[in-house]
Image (spheres, rainbow, N blue to C red):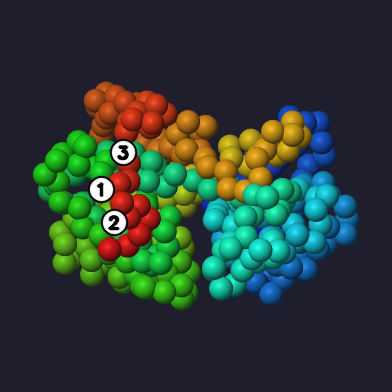
Amino acid sequence: MVTDLGTLNDKGYNEYSYKGAVDAATSLGASSPSSIVPKDSSEYKADIQQFVDQKFAVIVTIGFNMTSATVAAAKANPTIHFVGVDQSPACVDPTGAPDSTFACKGDAKKLLPNYTSLYFAEDQAGYLAGIVAAYASKANIIGAIGGTTLCAPCVRFIQGYELGARSVKPSIVVKSSYVTRDFSAAAFSDPAGGKIFASTFIKSNKVDVLFQVAGATGNGVLEAACASKIYGIGVNVDQWSSLGAPANACIITSAEKRVESAVKQAVMGIAADTLAAGDVLFNAANDGIGASDFHDKASMFGPEVKAALDAALAGMKAGTLKTCPDTGCGVFK
């Protein structure tokens, strides 16, 4: 596994993805996976190549920023299986090489049969978070802050959040805002900036529950929520557990992408020769998304909340529940 930047034990995507690889290796009777943590993006290609040179059969890479390096490696090494976490859609040119112009005229599924990108139904996870937010809110005004308007998964999280909240309280007011409109560091790598942005947002909108969809910037959003004595909702992993005390003091749940389960399923699928090439969706039907436990906030919620969450999950699994707009899902408007 070549992780995203940071640390292996980051209590986030890197750690949970690695746990999934370890779970799969254990189930298959394989040795524990090796890992490399790049120091910066300039090392992505070389780090992947280290594992290619060591003749590993499966190489997992983490995060959208590693897409081009992973796709290039998959094209150059057709006998090695590559799994990219959150790298959809895989945009390639007609030869199967990474397409920096994003014309995406090649079919990655056919051109790179040894590459699979795992992606997630963020709108479903957001919908569950919205249900919890609606039950927690007394003011009937809740909020969400995304990292950038250009991040389609961020938009889907918030679109689902709005629909989930309104399924409980049709008249609830949902305020949302984005830190930036580009992919600068402010979007996902600036906790201090996120705290300042969220503090202003909270004062202006008078929300009493705030959902963050902004990576490390969003950790600052949660800090602002706790400092303002309102409730916070985390994203991607169970942030109550990952952030720990005192940072988790106001977190009531998190909208989870269950990367541990997804990576395990992907590696097991390679072993069984059942994993499809191209983009593979993880959603409620295959344990790819969920809402985190309430932990120390459990006493806030009665049995009707669990019932609402269970009903929503059942609808998602059956394909009967709409968790994203019919048009413009993942598109900022």
- Residue type indicated by callout 3: Lys
> Left of 196 or right of it: where is 153?
right
Q: Position of residue 124 (x, y in %)?
A: 38, 41
- Asked if residue 276 is positioned above or below residue 250 in the image, the reply reads above
Give the SS element for disc 2.
strand
In this rendering, the label closer to the viewer, 2 or 3: 3
Residue 322 relative to residue 83: left or right: left
Q: Residue 116 or 174: which is nearer the viewer?
A: 116
Q: Does the CB distance between marks 1 and 3 fall below 8 Å?
A: no
Secondary-structure class at tag 1: helix
Give the mark count.
Answer: 3
Question: What residue sits right under mark 3 in the picture?
Answer: 322
The answer to the question of whether label 1 and label 2 lie on touching residues, with beta carbons closer than 8 A, is yes
Q: In the depicted view, which residue is nearer to us: 231 or 312?
A: 312
Q: Quadrant of residue 134?
A: top left
Circle 1 residue: 162
Q: Report whether residue 37 is seen.
A: no
Q: Name the residue type under label 2.
A: Ala
Of labels 1 and 3, earlier in sequence is 1
Label 2 sits on residue: 144
The span from disc 1 to disc 3 (Cα, nearest Å) is: 12 Å
Q: Amino acid at mark 1?
A: Glu
* Residue at x 21%, y 62% (from the top left corner): 202
